[in-house]
Image (cartoon, rainbow, N blue to C red):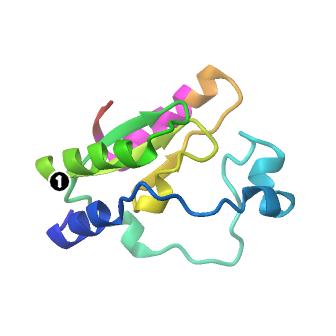
Amino acid sequence: MSEDRRNEVILRISPHAPVSLDADLAPFDPISAEPGKALFPGTPGREISARLFAPMTSICFGVRVTAETTDIAGLAMKIGRMAYERDAVAIILSHVERSGLERFGFRVERVAGETDQERAECEQELTRFWNIVVVI
């Protein structure tokens, strides 16, 4: 992760929260209609970017989020500091519908599945995909 990108993530962290539009947008959101069902949403007619398959040159670590927190800015600052200190990329493995860390610029991967086994398999696949060295 470049120094500019790290600074961008750190500077985006603020204790102020935006106004929630979730209740207004819920009728249009397929994820809120059936939580855990959107394993692989289809994207017909789109070409996949070659940059997605470029070799990873950064070290990635995973952060497992299994419950919502009231101090999301504090958590974001801790994760941002860890990424900055270790010159690594934080990948958020979210077991909740919305972790709250998306707005700070972190890469958030939603762990989907209806059972513990399915969620564990999904998390393992994401760990392999991002070449995550440790999950905390």
Question: Hey, which residue is sitting farthest front in the picture?
Answer: 16
* Foreground residue among 88 and 121: 88
> With 91 as the anchor, is 18 left or right in this view?
right
Q: Total marks drawn?
A: 1
Q: What range is drawn magenta here? A: 120-132
**Quadrant in the picture for residue 4:** bottom left
Q: Which residue is found at the position 40% from the left and 62% from the top?
A: 105
- Disc 1 is placed on an element classified as helix
> With 107 as the anchor, is 115 left or right in this view?
right
Relative to residue 103, is residue 96 depicted above or below?
above
Q: Which residue is found at the position 22% from the left and 63% from the top?
A: 6
Relative to residue 50, is residue 69 depicted above or below?
above
Q: Identity of the amino acid at label 1?
A: Tyr
Q: Which residue is found at the position 44% from the left and 41% from the top?
A: 71
Relative to residue 50, is residue 72 depicted above or below?
above
Position of residue 36 measured from the top left corner of the image (x, y, whole percent): 71, 39
Q: Magenta part mainly helix, strand or loop?
A: helix
Question: Hey, which residue is sitting farthest top in the picture?
Answer: 116
Check the picture and name the quadrant holding the N terminus: bottom left
Q: Residues within 10 Å of mark 1 (few under 14, many from 20)?
A: many
Inspect the magenta stretch and tell me whether residue 122 lies in it.
yes
Q: Which residue is found at the position 38% from the left and 64% from the top?
A: 53
Position of residue 28 measured from the top left corner of the image (x, y, whole percent): 83, 63
* Foreground residue among 129 and 92: 92
Position of residue 56 measured from the top left corner of the image (x, y, whole percent): 26, 58
Inspect the magenta stretch and tell me whether residue 65 lies in it.
no
Check the picture and name the quadrant holding the C terminus: top left
Question: Hey, which residue is sitting farthest right in the picture?
Answer: 27
**Quadrant in the picture for residue 78:** top left
> With 11 as the anchor, is 129 left or right in this view?
right
- List the residue tagged with mark 1: 84
